[in-house]
Image (spheres, helix red, strand yellow):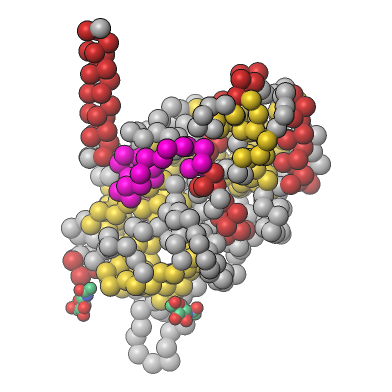
């Protein structure tokens, strides 16, 4: 009895100490905590969900809009999409990192997004923003950027007026159903102990729709205005992250910026650059196995195509991994062959079965050029809250999305270190428990 009481006290003590530490100061290096949106350290303070499967289904219900948005990120194309009307789930991204803008630094919890180039934050006086905004007036290092600068062209800024100076204004859509207007400005960006001076970002004036992250977004894409491009020598175009499970209430993962402290003996696959969608991180998916069986698939459904943008991307903002229909159907058929039914559909998941069959159920392996990623149980299946059903946690690319693009999403990346070594054009994947 005593022993149990002591043990529970210890467990309580350890978890609260860890939580305090994580929600407070950052580690003493370039690492940033990656905070799951439903976590204890999340400033958005959503109630701790009763049922994880419905929470994840809810989060995944925004994936079609996300995938549509990703497919719209075509070079030279203006990215205006219509704002959807009616009821919407509030989604504010899945993971946030704590950064500081300006001098002295103003704390913002920005959404981590590997498929966006530019960073942006809501600024004081903004219409439609939440209460936490960045106040340019309170920063001594703030400056606006002129419409004639090349950076303004990179954000598709409005043309300069015929006479007189003007600052750079631009509009952008986000998440498939929202948009904002912003001015391009510059200020110091503080990440853990590092300062990126004169960092250019969008200072948001007006928001419409519900998907724009309330405290801004940190774009880790590969375009010219992304954090990687602007931090130059500081991080040498290398970063990695470990995303904790959504269910991980007390813990945070980490974002490691720069080459120091990255895993050295990590298996890698080439990172491909697709000129059709230059912001996105493409990889070469060469096949998928279900258990020991390599799924038969016509190579064209996996092919990388620089003209159409077809191929496979890795994305931090999509929840459930999406395969193009023929590939998805082939994976599902093989899975159904190997597992005892009957199968039911729960939300986005079409292959749910008796949870008691889970230990025998085959695991999915993603084969990339030079690297195979065998998904552990937790990245393969989701459980209903009662625990009676297990669901294969993948889905097809939605029908209305005109993109031959597979998306490796965050549910499958959780508890892995994903290394984006842009400098050496390679992506590393290794199992790491960061819950
Ligand atoms: C910031 O300062 C400018 C110039 O002093 C002033 O016009 C503006 O109203 C201030 N904005 C806010 C939000 O305080
Ligand atoms: C940008 O957005 C603002 C506010 O929503 C709107 O008034 C303006 O017409 C838009 N400009 C362009 C070029 O889309
Ligand atoms: C993808 O990998 C396969 C197998 O190694 C190779 O034949 C193909 O050329 C690669 N595709 C690209 C675009 O690198």
Work out whether residue 427 or residue 336 is closer to the camera in this orientation and state it.
Answer: 336
Residue 373 versus residue 272 in the image, above or below: above
Work out whether residue 391 or residue 213 is closer to the camera in this orientation and state it.
Answer: 391
* Residue 43 place in picture, x, y as percent: 30, 48
Q: Residue at x 34, y 85 (%)?
A: 165
Placement of the C terminus among the 4 image quadrants: top left
Q: Is residue 318 left or right of residue 92?
A: right
Q: Residue at x 51, y 47 (%)?
A: 58
* Residue 353 place in picture, x, y as percent: 65, 29
Residue 105 versus residue 29 in the image, above or below: below
| Residue 260 visible from this viewpoint | no
Q: Residue at x 45, y 54 (%)?
A: 91
In the image, residue 262 lies in the stretch drawn in magenta: no
Magenta part of the protein: which range?
30-56
In the image, residue 36 lies in the stretch drawn in magenta: yes
| Residue 81 visible from this viewpoint | yes
Work out whether residue 338 or residue 24 is closer to the camera in this orientation and state it.
Answer: 338
* Residue 229 place in picture, x, y as percent: 43, 56
Placement of the N terminus among the 4 image quadrants: top left
Residue 353 versus residue 77 in the image, above or below: above
In which quarter of the view is residue 283 placed? top right
* Number of numbered callouts drawn: 0
Q: Is residue 63 left or right of residue 241?
A: right
* Residue 235 place in picture, x, y as percent: 38, 46
Work out whether residue 337 or residue 401 is closer to the camera in this orientation and state it.
Answer: 337
In which quarter of the view is residue 402 placed? bottom right
Q: Residue at x 27, y 36 (%)?
A: 22
């Amino acid at each position: 009895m005593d022993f149990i009481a002591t043990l529970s006290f210890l467990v309580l003590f350890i978890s609260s100490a860890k939580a305090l530490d994580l929600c407070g100061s950052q580690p003493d290096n370039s690492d940033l905590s990656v905070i799951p949106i439903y976590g204890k350290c999340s400033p958005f303070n959503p109630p701790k969900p009763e049922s994880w499967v419905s929470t994840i289904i809810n989060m995944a219900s925004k994936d079609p809009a996300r995938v549509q948005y990703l497919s719209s990120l075509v070079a030279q194309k203006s990215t205006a999409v219509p704002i959807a009307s009616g009821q919407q789930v509030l989604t504010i991204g899945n993971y946030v990192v704590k950064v500081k803008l300006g001098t002295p630094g103003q704390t913002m919890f920005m959404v981590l997004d590997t498929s966006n180039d530019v960073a942006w934050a809501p600024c004081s006086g903004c219409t439609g923003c939440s209460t936490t905004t960045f106040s340019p007036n309170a920063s001594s290092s703030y400056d606006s950027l002129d419409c004639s600068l090349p950076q303004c062209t990179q954000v598709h800024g409005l043309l300069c007026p015929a006479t007189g100076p003007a600052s750079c204004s631009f509009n952008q859509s986000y998440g498939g159903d929202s948009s904002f207007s912003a001015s391009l400005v510059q200020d110091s960006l503080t990440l853990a102990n590092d300062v990126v001076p004169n960092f250019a970002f969008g200072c948001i004036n007006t928001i419409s729709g519900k998907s724009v992250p309330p405290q801004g977004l940190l774009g880790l894409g590969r375009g010219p205005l992304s954090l990687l491009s602007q931090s130059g020598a500081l991080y040498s175009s290398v970063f990695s992250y470990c995303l904790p499970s959504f269910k991980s209430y007390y813990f945070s993962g980490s974002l490691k910026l720069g080459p120091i402290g990255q895993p050295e003996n990590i298996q890698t696959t080439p990172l491909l650059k697709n000129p059709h969608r230059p912001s996105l991180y493409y990889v070469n998916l060469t096949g998928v196995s279900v258990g020991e069986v390599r799924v038969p698939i016509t190579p064209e459904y996996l092919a990388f195509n620089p003209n159409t943008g077809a191929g496979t991307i890795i994305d931090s903002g999509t929840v459930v991994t999406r395969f193009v229909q023929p590939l998805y159907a082939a994976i599902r058929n093989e899975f159904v062959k190997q597992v005892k039914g009957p199968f039911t559909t729960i939300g986005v998941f079409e292959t749910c079965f008796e949870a008691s069959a889970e230990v025998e159920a085959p695991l999915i392996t993603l084969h990339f050029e030079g690297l195979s990623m065998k998904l552990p149980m937790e990245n393969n299946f989701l459980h209903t809250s009662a625990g009676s059903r297990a669901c294969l946690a993948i889905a097809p690319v939605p029908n209305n999305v005109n993109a031959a693009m597979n998306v490796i999403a965050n549910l499958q990346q959780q508890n892995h270190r994903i290394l984006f070594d842009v400098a050496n054009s390679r992506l590393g994947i290794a199992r790491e428990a960061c819950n």
